[in-house]
Amino acid sequence: MTKLLARTISTFLFEIIILAIIFFMLYGTKLSRWEMLWTSHYWNLPIAILFVTLCFIFSICIATWSIFLTRQKEQQFEQALQNVLKSDNVPQETFDVNVSLQKSLTITRELISTQRKSLQKLTNDKAVNQDQMIQERIIQERQRLARELHDSVSQQLFAASMLLSTVNETASEDLPEHTKKTLLQTEQIVQQAQLEMRALLLHLRPVALKNKSIMQGLEDLLVELQQKVTFKIQYRLEEVHLSKGAEDHLFRIAQETLSNTLRHAKATELELLLVERNKRVIFRVRDNGVGFRMGNEKAGSYGLHNIEERAVEIGGTCKIVSVPTQGTVVEVQIPVEKETLKDDSNSIS
């Protein structure tokens, strides 16, 4: 209302000034019979007063029309700004504004787009860096726990196992039968605890290959494992051609599989195979342990699900076959890109 009144008064004064200028220009001429404005009446009003009233009404109309146009332009400009904020690809036809303002809107849109992309990149980089820091801290903590367990609990379990073995070998025949049985059961429990500890240490160890190939990493892992377990380990390892990320995942699958075998299989033999045939890398672990019934939710432990998920992440397939009292076979096959293959005419025996 204030804007309308201000524009009406300003327009009315402008009209009066124009009329005054015309009056002084025509004053003294034959056309200037101004007395008629004051002597003539229309609708019982002097023509001068009626003329001034019409000018005021005309001023109100002009003020109303100008305010309407101003609001329409403001709405168009507001819509243009909203479109710039909502989307980076707004067609210029939607902006009913002059060229200079259109250019300013285009510059603003480009600036907002650049700032938005920069903020997204900063956010993504921050999230990636945080994940890397968390992973590094997890690996460091796992290394620390593995060292402490190996230096304390593992050594104590080994010492207890040796003492119990010595006691059972030198036990007097005068000892009651239930005492001998208890000592033997205790030795078996300690040996099982040793296997559990070795499986836990294997799981806690760093999973990175540290610039080694998957064949070298598995060979070092199996040689070290042979020195600590009582069952027989046979393996066949060949050089395969995988990306660094796929090798790391496959090494983690191998660690998880061996850890499950140590903890649950109660096996006396274990066979491991790593070869590349027919454009596929084949990793297979077979044991002659207790096995489990396929489809048993309890038997399908977290470790086996983890193996399947890791195989899928690198585009491979995982097959697990187990028969109670006969053992378990875990096989992972990973397709190899054509450009990374080398000629290989050998076949799996």
Image (cartoon, rainbow, N blue to C red):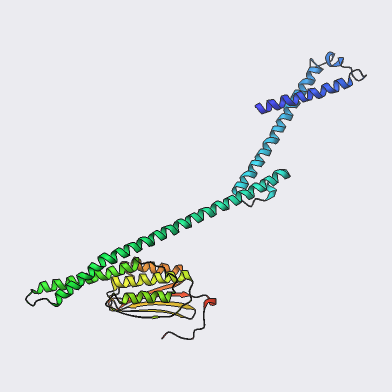
Front in this rendered view, residue 158 or 103: 158
Q: Residue furthest left?
A: 174
Q: Quadrant of residue 133?
A: bottom left
Residue at 33 percent across and 75 percent down: it is 224
User: Can I make out residue 189 in this image?
Assistant: no
Visible residue check, residue 3: yes
Q: Pick the residue in front: 248 or 307.
A: 248
Where, quadrant-wise, is the C terminus in this rendering?
A: bottom left
- Residue occupying image coordinates x 29% and y 70%: 198
Count how many numbered circles sit on residues in the image.
0
Q: Is 1 situated above or below 253?
A: above
Can you give x and y, in whole percent of width and height, for residue 219 in the image? 38, 77
The image shows residue 139 at horizontal and vertical percentages of: 38, 62
In the picture, residue 63 is in which quadrant? top right
Q: Between residues 276 and 158, which one lies in front from this camera angle?
A: 158
Query: What residue is rendered at 41% in x and 73% in y?
Result: 318
| Vertical position of residue 75 compared to residue 9: above or below | below
Q: Does residue 199 appear left or right of residue 177 in this picture?
A: right
